[in-house]
Amino acid sequence: MNTQSIVERIREIIDDETLVQLKEELNSYHEADLADIFQELKPEERLQCFKLLDLEKAADLMEYLTPQIQVELLGDIDEEMASKILTKLPHDAAADVLGDMEEDESETYLDKLPHKFSEEVRELLTYNEDTAGGIMNPVVLTVNSDMSVQDVLNHIRIKAEEDNMELYYVYVVDKQNHLLGVVSLRKLLTSPITQKVEDIMISDIVKLHVDDYSDFITDEFMKYQYNALPVVDLYNRLKGMITWDDVHDLFEEETTEEIYQSSGISTEVVDEDEILSGNIINAIRARTPWLFITLLGEFIAVNVAHHFDHTFSLLPVVATFMPLLAGLGGNIGTQSITLMVRGLSTGQVTLSSALHYILRESCIGASIGLLFGFLVMLVTWGWQHNVGLGCVVGLAMAINMTMATAIGTFTPFALKAIKVDPAVASGPVIATTIDVVGLAVYFTLVTVYLARVFS
């Protein structure tokens, strides 16, 4: 699908004021494609197109739009229509949309929603949005343990149609809604219809708690590979379930956050959606904190260079090699950081294996450093016709790259040990640390070399 050509076509239809044709055109697209189209339209064009969508299509589209556009569209249409669209959404999706609104605005919509739906959404809004309670869908299919397979199948036909629920597993509960077991649809369809649920249910249940945070949730889904997991409270009462598509969104959010943090962009100060396309002031707020810290770090690097002023005066050419050393040291350090942060994130690397990976990466850094150091030595020797300077620069390169990999590998483990997100390690602060250490090593070696030459 060529989104740009479709956007141009839609604009032509809007200009021709053929609304019947526009409505037919818009409702023919898949919701995911519509979301791409809406992203390219101007706000007034989006609103005009949104009003022409069928109710079901509009509700499905909401789940694909960014929070910013969701709030924009719902705020510009009739409150009655907005409430109807929200009612068509899954409970967790409706809670996400309302959670991005101002409190008085969300209350207005909640008051207009059906009472049962409104109460369930209100409960979701009481949980932290990054916990299982804030992510889960409270509408789940439950049965009693003494029901037969036939009873359950009949129950599914009725409830699934009534509540428009997602069907992955059937959860077995007692009269107080305590979670007792789980049965897959496959097991139900392949079991004798007279068999009791308690005979075919799995009692050893993998479950989440309402206060579990998103990183733990994604780890559990990656570990067990289920399509959905139940969510319970402190008393083991079933509160809802989280599905694989919810976790897909979590993965996307975590990946985006890691990328931003690796570039020194703070997602704690400003919401992620505001950084790229929101208010410019918010974008500045997100980007400046780490830059200030980097500025302080670079002043330390400047102070290190200033401390070796006499070295510059004796052999000015040494300044020429500073970008070379800083660049390669920073790059290899970033490679090690990236590998460790990703490994810790996926579970491939653990704290218990920290020493192994630090030694391994240091050996790799030393090997690469010796290779590049030898090449730099040859080039410097041939360029400056000074074998001593070539050896100094080559040795500095080898030491710098070895230390950069060691620092880059150690830092994520250290942050993980003190319960700080390791993704922070790949930010500008560590790059600055590597710069300072690299310059200190380089200037020390050059100073020792010059002392021997002029002694």
Image: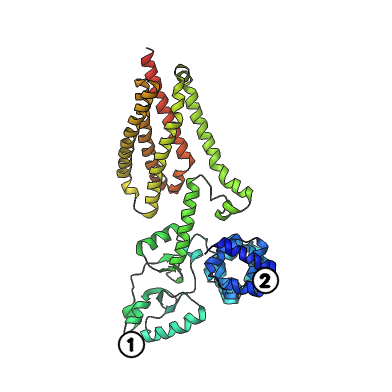
* Mark 1 surroundings: few (<14), some (14-19) or many (≥20) residues within 10 A: few
* Mark 2 surroundings: few (<14), some (14-19) or many (≥20) residues within 10 A: some
Kind of residue indicated by mark 1:
Thr
**Badge 2 element:** helix
Classify 404 as above or below 47: above
Q: Residue at x 53, y 46 (%)?
A: 265
Q: Residue at x 46, y 66 (%)?
A: 245
Looking at the image, tell me whether mark 2 or mark 1 is earlier in sequence order.
2
Tell me where residue 31 appears, x and y as whole percent: 54, 69
Determine which quarter of the picture holds residue 88. Answer: bottom right
Kind of residue indicated by mark 2:
Glu
- The reply to whether discs 2 and 1 touch (Cβ–Cβ < 8 Å) is no
Residue that mark 2 sits on: 79
Tell me where residue 252 appears, x and y as whole percent: 47, 58
Could you tell me how many numbered marks the image carries? 2
Cα–Cα span, label 2 and label 1: 49 Å
Q: Is residue 344 visible?
A: yes
Q: Residue at x 33, y 37 (%)?
A: 368
Q: Is residue 100 visible?
A: no
- Left-right relation of 303 to 350: right
Classify 236 as above or below 275: below
Disc sitting over residue 194 in the figure: 1
Tell me where residue 275 appears, x and y as whole percent: 57, 51
**Badge 1 element:** loop
Front-most of residues 332 and 346: 332
